[in-house]
Image: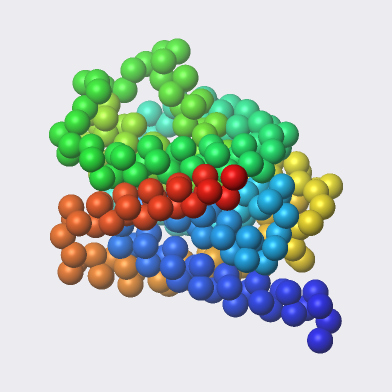
Amino acid sequence: MDLDLLTIISLAVAMLGVGVFAGVLAGLLGVGGGIIIVPALFQLFAFMDVDLAVRMHLAVGTSLSTIIVTSISSLRSHSQRGAVDWQLLRSFGPSVAVGVITGTAIAGVVSGAALTAVFAVMALIVAWYMGFAPDDLRFARELPGGARRAAIGGVIGAISAMVGIGGGSLTVPTLVLCNYPIRQAVGTAAAVGLIIAIPGTAGFMLSGLDAEGLPPLSVGYVNLVGFAILVPVTWVAAPWGARLAHWIRPRLLRLCFAGFLFVVSIRLFASLV
């Protein structure tokens, strides 16, 4: 059998496992798949001996490509239920888009080690929030307006694009900490995810066109095998996790996810040394 064909088959089988894992955890914990898919892909590409210089870029770009589809579906569902604040998006979305472009440009020129470190730090922050932040913690009575709102949107867009998440892991906590209703925070975050994923995916594709050491069927830093398999598999597996969630206490779920992200962060830091 041709070596490239064997590699593609092995990659497809491994992606099935990653998709099931990410889908179940996303449904179980109620989080976006990106925060799970990126470290899972990073470990998979490490197992396949993909060069560390492009490993995290490839994981982030592939994750962003899957978020395009999942965000569209999620946005439609939340919009039908009136849970998307379109007025907020009109003032918030443009700055998020600018942040995405900035973050993608930075990710295209920094080393794989630097990108890995950014994700590791991000995972630690989310782990703290999920595991230790009080449910009634609030930083403001409402989301600031004007330049401060634009700055918040820009930071969310830049970081989300750099680490391959759809924005839910940052957008939802940010809105909730600013006294925003959780239902609308989640629905609005789905729209933010789409704003992040489309330009982010395009940017990672373009910036990786001349990269060396990528696995077969990759367009820049987006692996098409991963995209084709992860989207339907995570879609099917997410309800399994959602059903399992009814058997576990919510507080225990948050602590388990925090522990998972903490371990992920430590492993990523370890890979740098």
Q: In this view, does 86 lie above or below 208?
A: above
Residue 227 shows in the view: no
Q: Which residue is drawn at 47% across and 32% down?
A: 156
Left or right: 269 as drawn, with respect to 56: left
Instruction: Indicate the quadrant containing the N terminus: top left, top right, bottom left or bottom right.
Output: bottom right
Q: Residue at x 75, y 51 (%)?
A: 220
Q: Nearer the viewer, residue 107 or 55?
A: 55
Left or right: 193 as drawn, with respect to 134: right
Q: For residue 245, what is the image quadrant?
A: bottom left
In the rendered image, residue 242, in percent from the top left (x then y), is placed at: 29, 66
Q: Nearer the viewer, residue 53 or 134?
A: 53
In the rendered image, residue 234, in percent from the top left (x then y), is placed at: 46, 66
Q: Which residue is drawn at 68% across and 51% down?
A: 52
Residue 244 shows in the view: yes
State the colouring used for the structure image. rainbow
Q: How many marks?
A: 0
In the rendered image, residue 264, in percent from the top left (x then y), is placed at: 45, 52
Q: Residue at x 53, y 48 (%)?
A: 270
Q: Which of 202 and 14 is in front in this view?
A: 14
In the rendered image, residue 146, in percent from the top left (x then y), is placed at: 41, 13
Residue farthest bottom in this picture:
1
Residue farthest front in this picture:
273
Q: For residue 142, what is the image quadrant?
A: top left
Instruction: Indicate the quadrant containing the C terminus: top left, top right, bottom left or bottom right.
Output: top right
Left or right: 215 as drawn, with respect to 40: right
Left or right: 68 as drawn, with respect to 236: right
Q: In this view, does 113 lie above or below 66?
A: above
Residue farthest top in this picture:
147
